[in-house]
Image (spheres, rainbow, N blue to C red):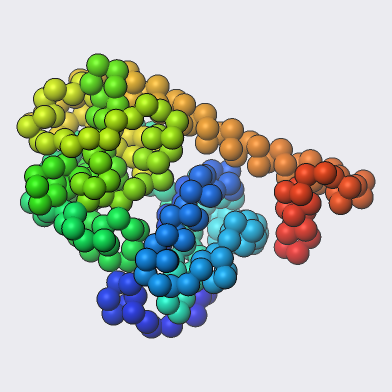
Amino acid sequence: MNNITLDECFQFGLGAFETIGIEKGTPILLEKHLKRLERAADFLKLGDPAVRGITAGRIEEYLEEQKKRPEVQKEFGGLEHCALKLMLTKENAVYSLRANHYTPENYEKGFIMDVSKVKRNETSPLVYHKTMNYGDCILEKRNATAAGMDERLFLNTKKQISEGTVSNVFFVRNGMIYTPKVSCGLLPGILREYLCDTEEVEETYIYVQDLKWYQECFVTNSLMGIMPVRQIGGIQFEEDKLTRELMRRYRKMVRDTANKKQIQINVIAKLSHSGKVMECEDPAFREMYLRMEVI
């Protein structure tokens, strides 16, 4: 149990957090998450997360520790499919696990969405960082659920589409992928960054009246990955061919990442039995072995 010190996070929401997908015990796109946390910590003047104890090495140790706990085995099946939450405030650095609630049925059916009456303030620097100042998102997500929606879109003060309550949004027209510009007042999501790095994505201004010109829509975050959207308000998206292909590519990357990590662990285990780990030329293998020895 973490010992929590009450600080400005609890008074004013001045803290940062990351929610990281865990597959087969492996954090997905971890480096990108840590870099974003570092940016938020710098913005909020929370100190260097690495100095505060949030590093890739410590995360690996934490996950290995959690795997050994019977209650974690029972709830998360050995960290096969769950989420790691990192929270950083002026006085606290907290690790915790939570479930990943997205189901195969969600992806098969696709999301039904509507548009929030709450406006995203693109002039506020807070919207560009993942901070504990998250009330608008959580309350509107709950309101969307109560209204029978899967997710809800925010517009900014200029009536441009910004983002979902817990997701970034993408649209497809004639085989091209479009997404709102960051300047529309959105959190640069990790999956958004991944897609912009690996696919041809045009960042642009999109208005609700433009939606009828797009054939496909999907939303993203680190736990859902890529989720097809069937409807936003009165606009239906009948096609999902490119969305499904992007889902396939992303899931392959996730599998490959988890499998690579497992192969590394297996190789280190074999080398450790032969006493040759420290002769290995790959420093990452040696570092991983030393962490395993500490654990």
Q: Nearer the viewer, residue 52 or 249?
A: 52
Determine the residue positioned at 51% across, 45% down: 29
Q: Number of callouts in the render?
A: 0
Residue 14's place in the image compared with 245, above or below, is: below
Q: Which quarter of the rendered picture does the C terminus lie within?
A: bottom right
Residue 101's place in the image compared with 51, above or below, is: above
Res 177 → quadrant? top left
Determine the residue positioned at 33% across, 58% down: 129
Residue 12's place in the image compared with 246, above or below, is: below
Q: Is residue 78 visible?
A: yes
Res 221 → quadrant? top left
Q: Nearer the viewer, residue 270 or 253?
A: 253
Determine the residue positioned at 33% across, 25% down: 243
Rendering coords of residue 11 (x, y %): 28, 80
Q: Going by the image, does 158 lie left or right of 162?
A: left
Q: Residue furthest right?
A: 274
Rendering coords of residue 70 (x, y %): 60, 60
Q: Going by the image, does 264 lie left or right of 73?
A: right
Rendering coords of residue 13 (x, y %): 30, 72
Q: Going by the image, does 184 lie left or right of 266?
A: left
Q: Nearer the viewer, residue 273 or 284?
A: 284
Q: Residue furthest bottom?
A: 6
Residue 135's place in the image compared with 5, above or below, is: above
Determine the residue positioned at 21% across, 29% down: 230
Q: Is residue 116 visible?
A: no
Q: Going by the image, does 97 lie left or right of 233?
A: right
Rendering coords of residue 90 (x, y %): 42, 77
